[in-house]
Amino acid sequence: MSIPEHIDQDKLAEVALAILALSARDDKFGTRAWKGMDWALTDLLYEKGWIGDPKGKQKSVVFTEEGAALAELYLQKHFSK
């Protein structure tokens, strides 16, 4: 899948990062989340510097420090009541 041109990629990236936060867990490598998202979305998050390289056989992605902080912020911003 590619991201359609009429979609705001910044908003999409924020929401995708927030959704990843729902499955995020800390381990010895940092904060990880299962990468059950479309490749175009994980590539977009990687390009923004919010997650490590999503390509590979691992079933999870590692958040960068910035990405971990923003994930929680965006989760509250887009989904809090």
Image (cartoon, rainbow, N blue to C red):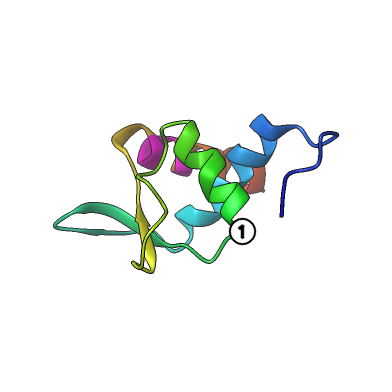
Where is 34 relative to 62, above or below? Answer: below
Residue 46 picture quarter: top left
SS assignment for the magenta stretch, majority: helix
Q: Is residue 54 left or right of residue 80?
A: left
Residue 68 within the magenta-colored segment of the rendering: yes
For the N terminus, the quadrant is: bottom right
Amino acid, disc 1: Asp
The magenta-colored residue range is 67-71
Q: Position of residue 62 (x, y in %)?
A: 32, 51
Where is 25 relative to 10, above or below? Answer: below
* Residue at horizontal 80 percent and vertical 37 percent from the top: 7
* SS at mark 1 in the image: loop
The residue where tag 1 is placed is: 38
Residue 50 within the magenta-colored segment of the rendering: no
Q: Is residue 10 left or right of residue 51?
A: right
* Residue at horizontal 61 percent and vertical 49 percent from the top: 40
Q: Is residue 6 left or right of residue 66?
A: right
* Residue at horizontal 35 percent and vertical 46 percent from the top: 63
Front residue of 15/7: it is: 7
Q: Most extreme residue toward the left, as rendered?
A: 28
* Residue at horizontal 13 percent and vertical 57 percent from the top: 28
Q: Position of residue 36 (x, y in %)?
A: 53, 66
Residue 26 picture quarter: bottom left
